[in-house]
C-alpha cells in the first residue's frame, strides 16, 4: 500500500494568494482528517470527513479555509487568501473506521510558507 | 475544555535505560488514548492504543498505562536504543468521538 499521499510537499507563496493542498487517503479507509502543526500550538485537527461527508469542522480557523472531499480517494484543503500566520505543516490522515477512536495513518505533510 | 499536557518537552537518557514519558489530561475522561511517534520532517506514526477499561498495554519494548483516577498515561520504552530518538505524541479521543486531541509531544534523545 502506498500510504497517504499529499501534494505538494512544500509550498511557498505570497500573502493574499490562494493555496490548495491535496490528499489521497489509503484505499478503503472511511475517515479522513486534516491537521495543522506549528511549534506554538502543536498538532491541531482542522476538519474530519466520514464517508466523504464533513462531520466536524470546528477546528477550521476562519472562512479563509475550506475543505472538500468529492470522492473517497481525494480531498483538498484550500486557503484563500493566505496570510503569513497560516505558515505551518499541514497533514492529512486516514483511518479504516468511522470516528477518531482508532489508528490514524498520516501522510508526509505539506510545509506551507506564506511570505 | 479538554486539555492534555505532556510535561516534558525533552528527555535525554542513555542507551539501555528505560524511558518514561508522561501524559496528563484534565476536564473529562476519554474512552481511548493513543501514542504516536514523529520523526523530523515526517508525519506521526501510530504506536499503541489503550482503552479506558485497560490498565496496561504492551507491544515489544513498549508499554503504556492508563490511570483514569490520576488522569494520566505513562509510556515506557525499555532497553532504549538511539533509534528510539524521536518525538512522542499522546492523543486523546474527544468527547464527541470525532477528533484526537494531541499533546505537544516529548522529544526523546537516546545517547549511545
Image (tube, coloured by chain):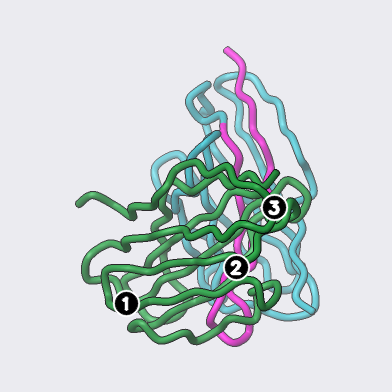
**Chain appearing in green on the rendered image:** A
Q: Earlier in the sequence, mark 3 or mark 1?
A: 3
Which quadrant of the structure image shows residue A36?
Answer: bottom right
Q: Is mark 3 on a helix, strand or loop?
A: loop
Chain seen in cyan: B
Q: Where is residue B52 in the image (x, y as percent from the top left)?
A: 57, 75
Q: Name the residue under label 3.
A: A15
Residue holding disc 1: A30
Vertical comparison of B7 with B53: above or below: above
* Position of A35 relative to B84 (above/below): below
Q: Is the magenta stretch mostly helix, strand or loop?
A: strand
Q: Which residue is drawn at 74% across and 51% down?
A: A84
Q: Which residue range is magenta in the image?
A: B86-112
Q: Which mark is residue A92?
A: none
> x%, y% of residue A102?
42, 70
* Mark drawn on residue A45: 2
For the residues bearing labels 3 and 1, Cβ distance under 8 angstroms: no
Q: How far apart are marks 3 and 2 (CA)?
A: 23 Å
Q: How far apart are marks 3 and 1 (CA)?
A: 34 Å
Amino acid at each position: 500500500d502506498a500510504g497517504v499521499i499529499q501534494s505538494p510537499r512544500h509550498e511557498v507563496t505570497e500573502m493574499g494568494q490562494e493555496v490548495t493542498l491535496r490528499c489521497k487517503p489509503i484505499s478503503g479507509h472511511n475517515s479522513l482528517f486534516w491537521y495543522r502543526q506549528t511549534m506554538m500550538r502543536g498538532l491541531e485537527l482542522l476538519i474530519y470527513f466520514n464517508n466523504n461527508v464533513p462531520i466536524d469542522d470546528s477546528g477550521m480557523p476562519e472562512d479563509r479555509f475550506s475543505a472538500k472531499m468529492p470522492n473517497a480517494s481525494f480531498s483538498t484543503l484550500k486557503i484563500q487568501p493566505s496570510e503569513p500566520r497560516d505558515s505551518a505543516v499541514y497533514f492529512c490522515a486516514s483511518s479504516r473506521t468511522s470516528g477518531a477512536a482508532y489508528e490514524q495513518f498520516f501522510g508526509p505533510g505539506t510545509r506551507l510558507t506564506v511570505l | 475544555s479538554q486539555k492534555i499536557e505532556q510535561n516534558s518537552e525533552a528527555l535525554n537518557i542513555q542507551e539501555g535505560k528505560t524511558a518514561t514519558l508522561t501524559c496528563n489530561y484534565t476536564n473529562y475522561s476519554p474512552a481511548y488514548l493513543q501514542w504516536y511517534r514523529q520523526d523530523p520532517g515526517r508525519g506521526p506514526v501510530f504506536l499503541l492504543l489503550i482503552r479506558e477499561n485497560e490498565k496496561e498495554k504492551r507491544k515489544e519494548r513498549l508499554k503504556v498505562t492508563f490511570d483514569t483516577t490520576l488522569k494520566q498515561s505513562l509510556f515506557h520504552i525499555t532497553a532504549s536504543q538511539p533509534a528510539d530518538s524521536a518525538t512522542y505524541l499522546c492523543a486523546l479521543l474527544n468527547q464527541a468521538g470525532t477528533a484526537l486531541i494531541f499533546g505537544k509531544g516529548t522529544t526523546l534523545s537516546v545517547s549511545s
